Image (cartoon, rainbow, N blue to C red):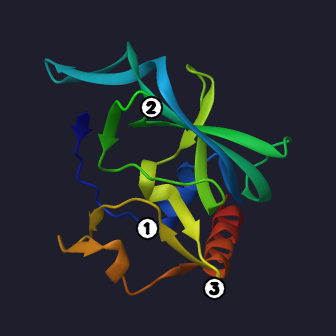
Amino acid sequence: NLVYSSVILEQPLEKYIEKAQLIVKGVVIKKEAKEEKHLLKQYTMSNGVLSENRTEVDAIYTTFTIKIDEILYGSHDEKTIDVKMLGGCNDEGSCLNISSNYDFEVENNIVLFLNFDEVNGFFRSTSNGITAYLVHENSSLVRAGEFVVANRNNQILSEKLQENKLTMEKLKTKIQDVKNEQ
């Protein structure tokens, strides 16, 4: 098993909306993890110049098939969408765990902020678990990852303890605000 860890600095919700090409609300109807070859971005610094390269890796990816109930931002013509996430556990018991990931299960009601990876040809969460939400019965949204975030005051906040819970209504209002500013 391989584990990666990351530190996440919380940003305003509007920044995540602006980064997304598509935001969908739906239900997970299929989940499958297997080894796949993809090109990953790799950044290097040389003489003060930052370069982006793509490196082919063979790693475990989890594919979530989402039945779309509502498109909140952007456009998509299909009734379902496949979303890939680096990491997960395959049928052979090998796992790749990344601290900023999310873990959806079949039948979860979800909201995902998505971008299309043109190089690899699939949709992915805009900011891993930061932009992957479970929708609860009372329409509150809770991030689907088991991680903590730091706010601008360098305070570590557990998702479970955050005071200002996001709801579907608040999210739709923020999305409309971003659309109005574009």
* Rendered residue at 38%/24% (across/down): 41
The residue singled out by tag 1 in the image is: 12
- Counting residues from the start of the chain, the first of labels 1 and 3 encountered is 1
Whether 118 is drawn above or below 19: the answer is above
Picture disc at residue 128: none
Left or right, 172 with reference to 140: right
Q: Amino acid at mark 2?
A: Asn
Numbered disc 3: secondary structure: loop
Circle on res. 90: 2
Q: Where does the N terminus fall, quadrant-wise?
A: top left
Q: Percent from the top left, x then y, of residue 160? A: 36, 78
**Label 3 neighbour load within 10 Å: few <14, some 14-19, many 20+:** few
Looking at the rendered structure, the secondary structure element under dot 2 is: loop
Foreground tag (2 vs 3) = 2
- Name the image quarter holding the C terminus: bottom right
Mark 1 or 3: the one toward you = 3
Residue appearing at x 38%, y 16% in the figure: 57
Are the residues flagged by discs 2 and 1 in contact, CB closer than 8 Å? no
Residue 115 position in % (x across, y down): 59, 40
Residue at mark 1 to residue at mark 3: CA–CA distance: 23 Å
* Of the pair 37 and 91, the residue shown nearer to us: 91
| Pointer 2 or 1: first along the chain | 1
**Residue at horizontal 53%, vertical 54%?**
104
Task: Report how many numbered discs are placed on residues in the image.
Answer: 3
Q: Which residue, given by chain and number where applicable, does mark 3 sit on?
A: 138
Q: Please state which amino acid type lies under the numbered disc 3.
A: Asn
Q: Residue 139 appears at what percent x and percent y?
A: 64, 80
| Image coordinates for residue 116, horizontal then vertical, percent | 62, 34
Q: Is residue 99 left or right of residue 178?
A: left
Q: CA distance from mark 2 to mark 1?
A: 34 Å
Residue at left offset 53%, top offset 63%: 133
